[in-house]
Structures are given as C-alpha cells and as structure tokens.
Image (spheres, rainbow, N blue to C red):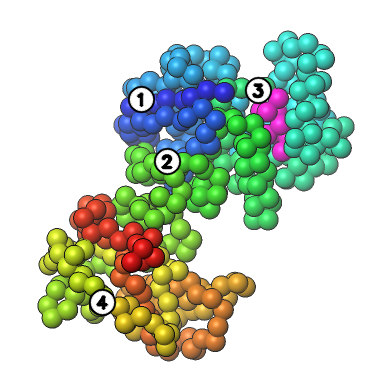
Amino acid sequence: MATVRLDNVRKVYDNGKVAVAGADFTVADGELLVLVGPSGCGKTTLLRAIAGLESISAGSIRIDGRVVNDLAPRERDIAMVFQNYALYPHMTVAENLAFGLKLRGLPRAEIAGRVAEAARMLGLSELLDARPRRLSGGQRQRVALGRALVREPKVFLLDEPLSNLDAKLRAAMRVEIARLHQRLAATMIYVTHDQVEAMTLGQRIVVLNDGEIQQIDTPMRLYDEPANLFVAGFLGSPAMNFFRGRLRAEPAWRLETDCGSLPLDDAADPSVRLGTCRDREVVLGLRPEHLQLVAGDAPASFAKFDATLEVVEPVGNEIFLNLRFGNVPMVARIAPRALPASGTHARLQFDPWRLHVFDAGSGERIEGVRFHPRAATAR
C-alpha cells in the first residue's frame, strides 16, 4: 500500500468555475479517508484527479512519494470502484473479476488464485459462474469491489459505491467495506454525500463545500468540535439546532433572538465562558440529543424555555420531536415516553455546557467559548 499526498491541488474549469480550491492533505498508508459534502462540492472531481481521470490546474499529487500529475491512470497503480457497477453483462462473475488481470498479461494460475481469494473474501465463491443479470444489487457491488481487489493496487478509490442500493443493503455493504479494509489494511479514499456513511466508515473525514475544504478530522472530533456552521449542520442526523441572536448578560445571561429570549442559566458563572462574547451576534448550536423535555429531576443549572410541538416522529428506540421556537425550527431526540399532543406547548431544557458557539458573521467556531460535549461529564 502507499501514502497519497495532495499539495495545494486546484481544479478550475475553462468557464472559470473553481471545482477544487487548494486541497492540501495526506492520506496515510493503510488509512480509510472519506471525502464528504453536498452535490457539486468537488469531492468526485478530487477523486478523479487522484485517479488521473481529471487533469488539475495547479498543485501536485503524490502516490507512494512519486508525483503522478502527468501519469496516465493505468500507470498510477490505483483501482477505482464507481457508483455504476459497470460489469460486463455477457461475462460470468469469474470472468468479470479476471478481465483486468488478463489485459495485464498475468499468468493464468496467478489470475485464478487472485480471483478465488477475492471471491472468498467477498462471499462470491458460489456465484463465480453466474452472470450479472442473476445477481442482486449488493452482489453486483461486491463483484465491482472484487474487480478492484484482485488488482492488488497501491490505492483503492471508491466513488459513491453504495448510492444505488436500498437502505438495508447500504447498511450491510458499509459493514462489508469496513471489514474488507480491516482485513487488507489498504489505503482507501472513499467519496460519499451521505454523512452516515462518512461517520461510520472514515478513520478521518475531509468535509468539502463549494470546492473548499472546511475541516479534516476524525468522525467524533468533527461531531464534537465542528470548525464552522457548515460542518456543524452537515454532520449529524437529525442536524444540529441553531439559534441566532445577541448575547446579553443583564439581568442574566441570555440570547436575544428575533422570536424571544433564550435563557442561558447555569449554576457556575457563565461569564467564564461567555464573557468574550457579551453583546456580540452569535449562533448557538445544540445537538438534538441534548435538547430534552423538562423532567422533574432536572438540574437547576439547566436552561429552560417553551416551544410549540408540531410533529412527533416515533422511530422505535427513540422519538424525534419537531418543534418551533418562534420562527426557529428545532428537533429533539428523546427516549420513548408519553408525549403532549401536537400543537401544544412543550417545556424544554438543555445544559448550557453542551452549546457550540459560532460567529454570526463568519460562521466560524468561537474557540474561546468552546462548549465541548464531554465537558459536562467532567464537572
């Protein structure tokens, strides 16, 4: 396997559109790195540039220490798995797996050995004589993975390989890919728009938006300490709740919003964390699991406010409450329990230590008043 290094890689199309603006990061040997972001953010363009299917406008790409900017895809020693399985319909599974190896002129015995091993790893041994039309979507995707696997490349590139599968198959194939990576200790770069795939598969995640890298970190660091409003709102399902307003300290700490005052009561002195933001326009973020209905044993330090309950979504082991605070929509994630009727007022609570604080103008995290989600357990 190998490292992949991108040094200030840019891609600008002839019409002036900047698809990738200065990508700069390293994929470690054996790492599974995920590129994630909304449609059109540049993640697939970046993957295709690494593969050699897309030229770059500036910067350099190194695979295993060698600059590959001017090398053809076949000379980069990579294998790519596409969203479209692209299997040959007239060939059997075994023939599909072996096709690329035959083109490279490998000995017949070596080809047979590689195909048999890949089929065993992916649970395809019983299907080697079948043609693609007989296979399910998940089986076809495993054949596509196997075709890359038999090549034994330095780097695996996967471009939204699960997007054509239904929800149940996607979940199963996520596990298959994670197991495969653990078994091979292979260098993999995985592109997806699905933040659940990104969080569950990636050892590190590169979050992109409009061609720019927003943040690179481990899944839980991104979730716990998002660098800006985009990352905070993109990662997490349901998404983070946001409250925009001005922080006031008199007579008590609160956020003055267009739809009312949001209290920020705390037994400890809030000025320790909020002092630098006094009278400043900010956006406060709160994860749905940290917004709860008021309970009789709620700590006195918890902030409490009223909101209108609009829609209740029971999903089995938890319930999503869709609420509204003035004109601000919110979601709370709670355990199953008896609930007030839709359209009625609900009393909500949250621990101010769970808040994330962002600058209202730039959208960047305000580090001096970080509310780390682990902080509450450390008090």
Residue 298 appears at what percent x and percent y?
A: 39, 82
Q: Are marks 1 and 3 in contact (CB under 8 Å)?
A: no
Instruction: Mark 4 or mark 2: name the one nearer the start of the chain.
Output: 2
- For the residues marked 2 and 1, what is the alpha-carbon distance in whole angstroms? 15 Å
Instruction: Mark 1 or mark 3: name the one nearer the start of the chain.
Output: 1
- What range is drawn magenta here? 142-150
User: In percent of the image, x 54 and y 76: which residue is there?
Assistant: 335
Residue 215 appears at what percent x and percent y?
A: 36, 43
Judge whether residue 242 is colored magenta.
no
The residue that mark 3 highlights is: 152
In-image side of 77 versus 19 (left or right) = right
- For the residues marked 1 and 3, what is the alpha-carbon distance in whole angstroms? 26 Å
- For the residues marked 3 and 4, what is the alpha-carbon distance in whole angstroms? 59 Å
Q: Give the residue type that dot 2 points to.
A: Val
The residue that mark 4 highlights is: 267
Along the line of sight, the residue nearer the viewer: 76 or 343: 76
Indicate the quadrant containing the N terminus: top left, top right, bottom left or bottom right.
top right
Instruction: Mark 2 or mark 1: name the one nearer the start of the chain.
Output: 1
Instruction: Mark 2 or mark 3: name the one nearer the start of the chain.
Output: 3
Answer yes or no: is residue 325 visible. Answer: no
In which quadrant of the rendered view does residue 371 lie?
bottom left
Looking at the rendered structure, which numbered label has been put on residue 206?
2
